[in-house]
Amino acid sequence: MAIPSDLDIARAALLKPLDDIAHELGIGEHLLEPYGESVVKIKLAAIDELADRPKAKYVVVTAITPTPLGEGKTTTTVGLGQGFRHIGKRATVAIRQPSMGPTFGIKGGAAGGGYSQVVPMEVLNLHLTGDMHAVTAAHNMLSAMIDNHLYQGNQLGLDQHNITWRRVLDVNDRALRNIVVGLGSRMDGVPRQTGFDITAASEVMATLALSSSLADLRARLGRIVVGYTSAGDPVTAEQLSGAGSMAVILRDAIKPNLLQTMENTPVLVHTGPFGNIATGNSSVVADLIGIHAGDFLITEAGFGADMGAERFFNIKCRASGLRPDAAVVVATVRALKAHSGKYKVVAGKPLPEDLLACSPDDVLAGAANLRKQIENVRLHGVSPVVAINAFPTDHPSEHDAIREVAAAAGARSAVCTHFADGGRGAAELAEAVAEAAEEPTEFRFLYDSQASLKEKIETVATRVYGADGVDYSAQASKQLATYEKAGFGTLPVCIAKTHLSISSDPSLKGAPTGWTLPVREIRASVGAGFVYPICGEMRTMPGLGTNPAAARIDLDENGEIVGLS
């Protein structure tokens, strides 16, 4: 029997009043700020009010290196949260807010799927409580302050050719990647080249995600570096007197949003940092609330374990002080077959017909990626559990092959049918995660904060990515020296590379060896609190495809949204 569309399934959900959902978390009405009928914001005072309650087991959901179609990591996160209720445990889910760029592009929304969704999915995928727009406004306020400073005489001596702060917008629009501002008369500003990134790529978004309080957010905003003088000295948002206004704009955006799943599991939805050049994780404040709100707190990290999970462990956990008890590695038959190198998967196009044929051998041929991502979790002293996200085109023998690989690597595994069966389809996974979370944990960071930036980069490159070493461009080496001199050397690193391979080359599948990580440029997100080396071309403003979702999304004759996925 065909499964209805995600939107039809979501609209059939029986929602509980959010006051009741909050009560399950131990959060009183005095800490809630309603936004319409289906979302509430939680005041930050909840962090202190819940602090004396027992801590939940902390679980991060990550994955093998995905195909361009994604492997259902959010759906698995939501399904696992629902699955715990089927084994008598209380769970809270914490995920990022979707960006409208991908929602109207190829990827679609990020509410989960099938019977493992966050609802109402239309509200979640379209604006929610306006946090994305607040980040856009705060970021562009600082951009306006920069150009006004240049116009008013440039007392700080900003080098117009070394201004690193761009503008942002929450759409996919390739035409805005590179622009010239200040054209027209003298009254229209100082002409210079700049550009737009998507809002999820904003340092303000990453800063919001890693802040632990409003005061911490204000301090971090002040540390944002917007560019450099001709002498190479950094110029900050505080020096431009822009940080205060930014904090005011973000005053409500720092409060997490409370929604629920199809089965009424509480969901904290907050912030949405880009997964390529930023942390790709939801907020610290949501986790500081959720960690005292049940038996398990389940959060999701973007892309594969070499990307979002590594940043979760080494950046987010440093900022929050929280320590994970287990990690779920989502794997699919189709992705492991793609890692065999025999098949090409293209976003927006059907899967190759041969890939759908029963072939455990193809699964095993691509299994090196799964082994390496399990190893990447274990590098941090965390117990991994492999979630085999089942698709209708899979074959039982292919699931068995994945189970064998997981067992050989010392990891538990479970086949999940949460897309079609909701929480019941993730009960086996919940049991496995509960067992793993009870094991003694020796969580550890991959590198010491006092190590040099080069040491940090090389540690991640060789131990997580499997590179032989790192090759720095002359520009990157010069920038590293500048950042060390400026006092940024104690910051963690967030390596910007492709998400389609453990290596820096998207065409290399499996777990490549015998390669060197090329670092062509280094940038500093000082407000967010990390330095990010850039390896290869990173698109921070996506473009729309030939048939974007925006062409299908509309209102019907009753004013209801159609075409949203």
Image (spheres, rainbow, N blue to C red):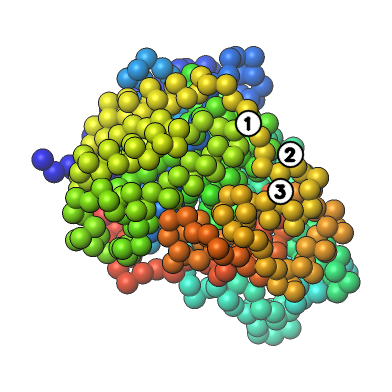
Q: Estimate the x, y position of residue 170 in percent, counting from the top left.
A: 50, 59
Q: Quadrant of residue 187?
A: bottom right
Front position among marks 1 and 2 = 1
Amino acid found under the numbered disc labelled 3: Pro
Residue 144 in view here: no
Q: Is residue 412 above or below residue 476?
A: above
**Which label's residue is closer to the chain start, 1 or 2?**
2
Helix, strand or loop under label 1: loop
Of all residues, the one furthest to the left in this rendering is 1
Amino acid found under the numbered disc labelled 1: Phe
Q: Nearer the viewer, residue 540 or 34?
A: 540
Q: Estimate the x, y position of residue 29 in percent, counting from the top left.
A: 52, 20
Circle 1 crowding by C-alpha within 10 Å: few under 14, some 14–19, many from 20: some
Residue 380 as seen in the image, left or right of residue 328 = right
Inter-mark Cα distance, 3 to 2: 18 Å
Q: Quadrant of residue 331?
A: top left
Amino acid found under the numbered disc labelled 2: Asp
Q: Which residue is mark 3?
A: 492
Q: Nearer the viewer, residue 318 or 266?
A: 318
Please give the name of the residue rendered at 36% of the width and 69% of the height, measured from the top-left corner: 545
Q: Which residue is mark 2?
A: 216
Q: Which residue is mark 1?
A: 443
What is the count of numbered marks?
Answer: 3
Q: Is residue 16 above or below residue 480?
A: above
Front position among marks 1 and 3 = 1
Q: Are marks 1 and 2 in contact (CB under 8 Å)?
A: no
Q: Estimate the x, y position of residue 562 in percent, counting from the top left.
A: 25, 52
